[in-house]
Image (spheres, helix red, strand yellow):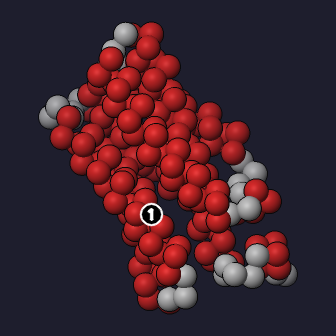
């Protein structure tokens, strides 16, 4: 049985279509991570965290727009509501515990995203044929690396054990989200 993407969007292979769906879901979640951070940071009146989240949120919104420009709505994940909620909670929960928790969470998320984009970049470089998409992914990955590096530079070490567990959970959750978004 041929997939919907294969039938209706022949310019992308089934594999690329699934990857784009996961990218769209991930960038949607990322936008909401920063919305969650901002919501809690406003309650705590933490201007540094608000500024950090607004700055990064703008970049994530740009990534989302870029992916939406090449992925028609009918091919996007049907789980966008859960991705929004999961993203918001992934931002809001650590913000309840302060900046260090937020920065560690963002470093964890962006490490995962960097690797996720790298897998796609490697695939496109090996198989060719999608030069514009390759450039888009390289651009998005570079921004994510900058986010990771900035957040990592602000983390205080050693991290508390519970924060290490949280970051591992966030990373594992991101991997599960990608698997689900590829399918739904």
Locate residue 21: give its quadrant.
Answer: bottom right
Residue at (71, 57) in percent of width and height? 76
In the image, 52: left or right of 19?
left
Q: In the displayed structure, would residue 170 be above or below residue 137?
A: above
Give the x, y percent position of residue 99.
Answer: 29, 24
In the image, 169: left or right of 80?
left
Q: In the displayed structure, would residue 173 be above or below residue 9?
A: above
Locate residue 165: give its quadrant.
Answer: top left
In the image, 12: left or right of 97?
right
Q: In the displayed structure, would residue 41 be above or below residue 148?
A: above
> Is residue 177 at all visible to an observer of this figure?
no
- In which quadrant is the N terminus drawn? bottom right
* Observer-nearest of 152 and 65: 65
* Observer-nearest of 36 and 56: 56
Residue at image mark 1: 116
Counting the numbered discs, the total is 1
Give the x, y percent position of residue 63.
Answer: 51, 53
* Observer-nearest of 30 and 47: 47
> Is residue 33 at all visible to an observer of this figure?
yes
Residue at (74, 62) in percent of width and height? 72
Q: In the displayed structure, would residue 150 be above or below residue 111?
A: above
- In which quadrant is the C terminus drawn? bottom right
Outermost residue, left side: 157
């Amino acid at each position: 049985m041929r997939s919907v993407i294969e039938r209706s969007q022949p310019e992308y292979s089934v594999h690329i279509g699934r990857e784009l769906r996961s990218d769209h879901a991930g960038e949607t979640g990322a936008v909401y991570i920063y919305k969650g951070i901002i919501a809690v940071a406003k309650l705590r009146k933490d201007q540094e965290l608000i500024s950090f989240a607004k700055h990064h949120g703008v970049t994530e919104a740009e990534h989302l727009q870029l992916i939406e420009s090449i992925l028609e709505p009918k091919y996007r994940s049907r789980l966008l509501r859960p991705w929004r909620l999961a993203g918001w909670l992934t931002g809001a929960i650590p913000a309840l515990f302060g900046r260090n928790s937020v920065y560690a969470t963002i470093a964890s998320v962006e490490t995962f995203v960097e690797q996720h984009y790298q897998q796609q970049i490697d695939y496109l470089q090996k198989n060719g044929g999608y030069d514009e998409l390759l450039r888009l992914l390289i651009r998005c990955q570079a921004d994510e690396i900058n986010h990771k590096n900035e957040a990592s530079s602000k983390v205080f070490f050693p991290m508390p054990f519970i924060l290490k567990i949280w970051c591992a959970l966030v990373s594992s959750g991101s991997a599960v989200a990608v698997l689900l978004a590829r399918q739904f």
